[in-house]
Image (spheres, rainbow, N blue to C red):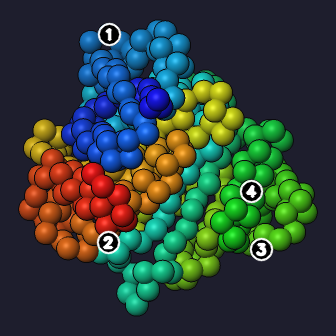
Amino acid sequence: MKKTWQIAVIAGDGIGPEVLREGIKVLDTAARLDGSFELQFHDFPWGCEYYAKHGKMMDEDGMEQLRKFDAIYLGAVGYPGVPDHISLWDLLLRIRKGFEQYVNIRPIKLLRGAPCPLAGVPREAVDMLFIRENSEGEYAGAGEWLFRGKPEEVVLQTGVFSRKGTERIIRYAFATARELGKSLTSISKGNALNYSMVFWDEVFAEVAKEYPDVPTHSYLVDAASMFMIKEPQRFEVVVTSNLFGDILTDLGAAIAGGLGLAAGANINPERTYPSMFEPIHGSAPDIAGKGIANPLAAIWSASQMLEFFGYKHLAELVLQGIEETLVEHEVLTPDMGGTSATAEVGDEVAGKIIRLFQQSGHIV
């Protein structure tokens, strides 16, 4: 009997529907080839267009509706006319926090055929796995806005670092590094943030004692930014806070082919709630509807979903399909130097997955 996975699809804004359509195409291809499972997709019309009509980013009982699914596939959130703090907090961060998706996983890997702005850096040097704390820290939403509009106006943005939250993300990162046989680097700013980041560094040192077999490094965030450009090979598995992880992974995307290849997973490790998978390039309203959006990040995040469900062999086939498409450089969208449409790139990757599957000895 086939396993059935229930997927909530929030295509969202701008190019979100266009790129998710290709990710779903690849997921369906992988499921059909494997034959042991199927995926059922359920669309939700939430996002900025929904907000313009209803004054809210999602249904009041949206979280209850999503809770029954195995995973969430998110396209993009944000559009002109809706303040970013509303679109972000009322949908994306609401889901991340409400479903305890406290692990954000961002692969920073220079695939074969992907462009890299760093001169003289071998492809193998850019191969990092960022594990970002995803539920608290600087994005906890704690603070005050005092004396609004007056000369003495003051705003306070409070970073929240609980022992539970800090310890669990660092322990998750250590376990991942051990499983992969790689080093773990912590990135903080303890010399300036004398409470939150000193605490982070202390917890990292405590947990490290439980994993004596995992080599460790610690960098200040400014130094880490420099080393990511000059010596990216220093970084294998990286653990860092919500804010630093947000910024550094975009820097990582820039050196690993651009935002068109940037995928992210928001994981609830206990699987009490659904995890969420998304390209992180944004809604790109300037090219929405033109059929030229790059779907490769959405397809890569589909690969992350397959791996999360336990189909690592299929996840690797999807990445190989992306790589072969990049190497051949015949069917790519304009941002990657090509002239192809979004759907054509999705078709190309799906076709390559079929061929790779056949070459591995399987019969379609």
Which is more toward the observer, 239 or 33?
A: 33
- Badge 1 element: helix
Q: Left of 302 or right of it: where is 335?
A: left
**What residue sits 21% from the left and 56% below the top?**
351
Which is more toward the observer, 268 or 167?
A: 268
Type of amino acid under label 2: Ala
3D distance between C-alphas at marks 4 and 2: 29 Å
Image x and y of residue 264, in percent: 47, 49
**Mark 4 and 1 residues: CB-CB less than 8 Å, in contact?**
no
3D distance between C-alphas at marks 4 and 1: 44 Å
Q: Quadrant of residue 147?
A: top right
Q: Residues within 10 Å of mark 4 (few under 14, many from 20)?
A: some
3D distance between C-alphas at marks 4 and 3: 12 Å
Which residue position is annotated with label 2? 114
Image x and y of residue 70, in percent: 51, 29
**Mark 3 and 1 residues: CB-CB less than 8 Å, in contact?**
no
Which residue position is annotated with label 3? 215
Question: Between disc 4 and disc 2, whose residue precedes?
Answer: 2
Nearer the observer, disc 3 or disc 1?
A: 3
Question: Between disc 4 and disc 1, whose residue precedes?
Answer: 1
**What residue sits 39% from the left and 46% below the top?**
34
